[in-house]
Image (cartoon, helix red, strand yellow):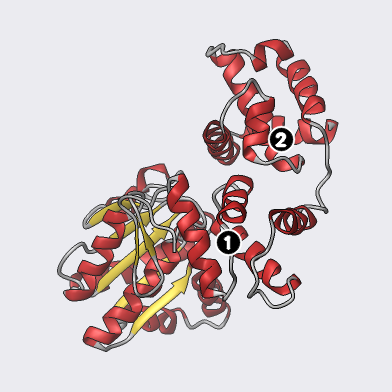
């Protein structure tokens, strides 16, 4: 098992590094004394960062240490349960199911942004559980202050305990996570293959896990080490449904749309008029080509894979929050 400075793998197979150390420590702390420390515990970070795994650890340890009724539910399921209760005129039963829990662990609360009635129901559930010192743990893909439709009375409650970021792991920790997940599947990976997967797949470990499962399925038995070429074949096969375009085509299309030259995009210029289109080129290249992050960065002015990762995160956030950016991306993709 690969380890890097400041990184270790727990007995439960969870890789702890600089990106999640505080979140992991807080999660363990609440299992010792639920409801009395860090309540609520609000964990936020990008999809695939390990928040759901932390919830599962919290659930298992609370049950092991204290027993009781621990409810772990994804917000999508929570919403469906609420909608069904409204349809069946049984909203009180819905509330009772959750507000009688000894601990409530709610995953992906950002999904509540679209359902006001369900937010109202959660508000009352939260209050009852909090007032009787029952542990609440919430995960989200953004910090409480970034919610656009949540009422202040709700987001303010998220900060009553501890708000904690679950960040993106550094490169070495990412490889450690890949090798750990592969090991759990009984799959042997060389360092070259782990590095290729880390370099090619951005940050979503759900995607990485799917790739590893496919490698295991397509290899003869998973016991012999797979080659980089085999991994490339699997990853490219998974992206075969995408339109494959060249970075050159993306550069030209973006340059026309933003009225900047290709040479400016490839340059070291840091003005916003150039940086935004450059980041969009990287974002589209990741979506529409089969090139690795390092290859994309190298093609776009000799930049490294970390720069491409940053650009993808930046544009991904803008697409979610700025309708103009979303429409621009859609137009560019249609043109390509």
Q: Is residue 67 left or right of residue 43?
A: left
Would you name the residue on which mark 2 appears?
285
Going from N to C along the chain, the mark reached first, 1 or 2, is 1
Which of these two is toward me, 178 or 326?
A: 178
Mark 2 crowd level (few <14, some 14–19, many ≥20, 10 Å Cα): many
* Residues at marks 1 and 2, CA–CA distance in whole angstroms: 21 Å
Which of these two is toward me, 98 or 4?
A: 4
Whole-percent x, y for residue 111 in the image: 51, 58
Location of the C terminus (image quadrant)? top right
Asked which secondary structure carries label 1, the reply is helix
Would you name the residue on which mark 1 appears?
206
Q: Is residue 185 left or right of residue 165?
A: right
Picture layout, residue 19 above or below residue 74: above
Q: Residue at x 58, y 61 (%)?
A: 206
Find residue 209 and report its image quarter. Answer: bottom right
Picture layout, residue 113 above or below residue 100: above
């Amino acid at each position: 098992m690969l380890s890097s400075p400041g990184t270790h793998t727990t007995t439960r197979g969870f890789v702890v590094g600089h990106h999640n150390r505080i979140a992991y420590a807080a999660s363990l702390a609440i299992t010792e004394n639920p409801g009395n420390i860090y309540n609520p515990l609000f964990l936020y970070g990008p999809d695939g960062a390990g928040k759901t795994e932390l919830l599962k650890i919290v659930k298992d340890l609370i049950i092991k240490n204290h027993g009781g009724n621990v409810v772990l539910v994804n917000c999508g399921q929570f919403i469906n349960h609420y909608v069904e209760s409204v349809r069946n005129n049984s909203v009180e039963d819905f509330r009772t199911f959750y507000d009688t829990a000894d601990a409530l662990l709610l995953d992906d609360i950002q999904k509540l942004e679209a359902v006001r009635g369900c937010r109202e129901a959660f508000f009352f559930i939260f209050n009852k559980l909090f007032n009787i010192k029952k542990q609440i743990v919430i995960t989200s893909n953004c910090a409480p202050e970034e919610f656009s439709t949540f009422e202040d009375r709700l987001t303010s409650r998220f900060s009553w305990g501890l708000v904690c970021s679950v960040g993106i792991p550094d490169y070495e920790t990412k490889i450690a996570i890949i090798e750990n997940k592969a090991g759990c599947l009984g799959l042997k990976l060389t360092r070259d293959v782990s590095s290729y997967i880390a370099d090619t797949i951005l940050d979503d470990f759900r995607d990485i896990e799917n790739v590893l499962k496919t490698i295991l399925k397509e290899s003869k038995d998973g016991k012999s080490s797979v080659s980089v070429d085999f991994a490339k074949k699997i990853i490219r096969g998974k992206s075969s449904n995408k339109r494959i375009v060249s970075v050159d085509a993306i550069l030209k299309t973006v340059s026309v749309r933003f009225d900047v030259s290709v040479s400016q995009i490839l340059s070291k210029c840091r003005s916003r008029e150039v940086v935004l289109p450059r980041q969009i080129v990287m974002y589209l290249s990741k979506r529409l080509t089969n090139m690795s992050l390092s290859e994309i960065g190298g093609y776009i002015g000799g930049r490294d894979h970390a720069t491409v990762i940053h650009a993808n995160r930046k544009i991904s956030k803008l697409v979610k929050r700025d309708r103009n950016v979303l429409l621009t991306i859609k137009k560019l993709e249609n043109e390509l």
